[in-house]
Amino acid sequence: MTETPPDYAERLRENRAEKDRLFAEERGSPVPPERREEFDGLDYFDPDPDYRVTATVTVHDDPEPVDMDTSDDRTVRYLRVVTFSFDLGGEAHTLRGYRQEGGDDAVFVPFRDKTTGQQTYRGGRYMELTPDRELADGDRVTLDFNLAYTPFCAFSDAFSCPLPPEENWLETTVPAGERVPGL
C-alpha cells in the first residue's frame, strides 16, 4: 500500500462528481444524448486506500508490439513499454503498461480482474499513468485502482475500445474504481 494523503477520499469523491457532471452535460460524453437527462452518475466502489499500491517498474528497452482485440472486432497495435510488479492483498501481481506508436507519454494499463463481467464492465477497465519523467528500471510508482475507469464502449457502440490482453488479467478481486455502468 502507498501512503495516502489525508484528504484523499474527499478529493476522489470531488473528482468523481465532476466526471459525473461532464458525462451528463458535455457534448463529448460517451453517454448517448437521449440518455443524458436520466443519467444520475456512475457507480463506484467506495474509496479504499488498500487499492493504492506501490509498483516497481521494469522498462522494456525494446518494446514488443502487442495486438489488442477491440470491442468492435478490430485489432489495434500497442507497444509493451513497462511491467509493473506489486503486491495486492498479500499476493504478488504484475500488469503491463502500453503506448501506441507516436502517442503521448501516458502509459495505458488495461486490465481485467475477478469483478470483470459481474461488478465491473465485461470488457475490463483502464488506468492511465502520466509520469513526470521517463521511467527507469527500479522506479517506484503508485498504481491507484480507485481511479480504474470503464471504457467509453460500455456506454455506446459508437466507441471502439481495446480489450485487456490476457497478460493483464489479474487472478484476484479488485473492488475499486468504477463499477459496471447502470445506464
Image (cartoon, rainbow, N blue to C red):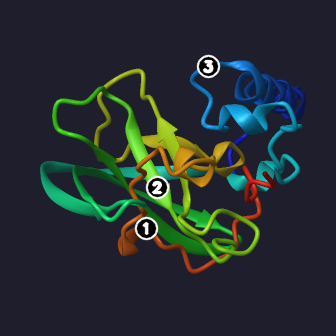
Label 3 neighbour load within 10 Å: few <14, some 14-19, many 20+: few
Q: Residue at x 63, y 46 (%)?
A: 149
Marks 2 and 1, how far apart at CA: 7 Å
The answer to whether 171 is drawn above or below residue 83 in the figure is below
Marks 3 and 2, how far apart at CA: 25 Å
Asked if the residues shown at circle 3 and circle 2 are in contact, with their CB atoms under 8 angstroms apart, the answer is no
Hey, what amino acid is under mark 2?
Pro
Hey, what amino acid is under mark 3?
Arg
Residue receiving disc 2: 110
Q: Which of 63 and 140 is in front in this view?
A: 63
Quarter of the rendering containing residue 5 = top right
The answer to whether 75 is drawn above or below residue 119 in the figure is above
Q: Nearer the viewer, residue 28 or 102?
A: 28
Say if residue 146 shows up in the picture: yes
Q: Nearer the viewer, residue 36 or 46?
A: 36
Q: Where is residue 18 in the image (x, y as percent from the top left)?
A: 78, 22
Question: Between disc 3 and disc 1, whose residue precedes?
Answer: 3
Assign a secondary structure to mark 1: helix
Q: Position of residue 93 (x, y in %)?
A: 51, 70
Say if residue 59 shows up in the picture: no
Residue receiving disc 1: 168
Q: Where is residue 164 in the image (x, y as percent from the top left)?
A: 42, 63
